[in-house]
């Protein structure tokens, strides 16, 4: 048998390999972590049970996934439910299923919460590989259950960072994303504040994103939390790899109002083409 030169063997990027291994181990150990995974209010993550709401058709061509922000002021993470419901109606002609996921550790406003391990809890420095894996596995379960032709993930603030991290850590999961008010460069975002040492930094993962990805980033000009420079720098990194990426600065929009901007639905229309 001829020897195979190690130089000719192509290895996947290290971060992608580690993430895939973590995901596979988690799925083996926690196959169905929701006692009642109904895909209406519950979906299993890698090792936790995540709350969700779904709107639209049960046999979709398109599945929209909505991820909320950090809600750092406290309270439930349910503001994206209404937007997800509106999107199901707006894009009904495309046979759309619209799913709002509650990220690990957040309450859903109905007295329930997505579970989270104690080590990954809190509302800061929590864009960790483990929490990203929880959301990514939930999306994988949703894909297997509903078998959509196309998946678009729309994230706001911390949900946008989580979306961008999934693009880099698990590039085959989905390749259409809308990032609203994204803290896409965590180092720049945390300047003058306590650094987030546990979290994955989206801008550091751009080299592993699929070349077929399409990304639209939106940030309000009046956003005093995540400046327009954070998402625009991220988009430039993608463009340097010839990835189809667009950044739009939204006049008169703030950190929170940008998520309600008509430009979010306009971005969905562009990615449906």
Image (cartoon, rainbow, N blue to C red):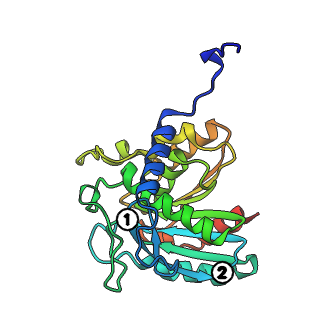
Residue 257 to residue 90: above or below: above
Which numbered dot is residue 58? Answer: 2
Residue occupying the point 67% across, 42% down: 211
Residue occupying the point 37% across, 52% down: 130
Residue 141 showing in the rendered view: yes
Give the crowd class for mark 2: few <14, some 14-19, many >=20 residues within 10 Å. some
Residue 64 to residue 215: above or below: below
Residue 5 to residue 90: above or below: above
Q: Foreground: 51 or 80?
A: 51
Residue 167 pos. (x, y %): 55, 50
Residue 157 showing in the rendered view: no
Residue occupying the point 66% across, 19% down: 8
Is 247 positioned to the left or the right of 195 in the image?
Answer: right
Which mark sits nearer the N-terminus, 2 or 1? Answer: 1
Residue occupying the point 22% across, 47% down: 194
Which residue, given by chain and number where applicable, does mark 1 sit on?
A: 48
Give the crowd class for mark 1: few <14, some 14-19, many >=20 residues within 10 Å. many
Residue 158 pos. (x, y %): 40, 60
Q: Is mark 1 on a helix, strand or loop?
A: loop
Is 141 positioned to the left or the right of 30 in the image?
Answer: right
Q: Mark 2 and mark 1: span between their CA atoms?
A: 24 Å
**What quarter of the picture does the C terminus occupy?**
bottom right
Residue 175 pos. (x, y %): 64, 53
Q: Foreground: 148 or 199?
A: 148
Q: What element carries label 2?
A: loop
Is 256 positioned to the left or the right of 54 in the image?
Answer: left
Quarter residue 57 falls in: bottom right
């Amino acid at each position: 048998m001829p020897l195979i030169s190690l130089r000719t063997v192509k290895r996947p990027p290290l971060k992608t390999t580690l993430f895939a291994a973590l995901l596979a181990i988690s799925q083996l150990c926690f196959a169905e972590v929701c006692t009642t995974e109904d895909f209406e209010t519950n979906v299993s993550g890698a090792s936790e049970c995540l709350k969700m709401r779904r709107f639209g058709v049960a046999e979709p061509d398109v599945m929209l996934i909505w991820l909320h922000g950090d809600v750092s002021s406290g309270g439930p993470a349910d503001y994206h439910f209404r937007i997800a419901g509106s999107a199901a109606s707006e894009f009904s002609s495309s046979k759309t299923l619209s799913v709002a996921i509650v990220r690990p550790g957040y309450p859903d406003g109905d007295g329930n919460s997505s579970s989270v391990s104690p080590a990954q809890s809190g509302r800061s420095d929590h864009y960790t590989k483990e929490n990203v894996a929880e959301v990514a596995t939930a999306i994988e379960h949703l894909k297997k259950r509903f078998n959509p032709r196309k998946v678009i993930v729309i994230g706001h603030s911390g949900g946008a960072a989580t979306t961008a991290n999934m693009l880099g850590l698990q590039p085959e999961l989905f390749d259409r994303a809308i990032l609203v008010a994204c803290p896409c460069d965590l180092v720049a975002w945390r300047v003058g504040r306590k650094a987030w040492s546990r979290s994955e930094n989206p801008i550091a993962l751009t080299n592993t994103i699929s070349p077929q990805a399409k990304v639209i980033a939106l940030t309000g000009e009046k956003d005093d939390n995540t400046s327009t420079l954070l998402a625009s720098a991220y988009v430039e990194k993608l463009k340097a790899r010839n990835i189809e990426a667009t950044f739009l600065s939204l006049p008169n929009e703030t950190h929170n109002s940008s998520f309600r901007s008509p430009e979010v639905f306009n971005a969905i229309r562009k990615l449906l083409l």
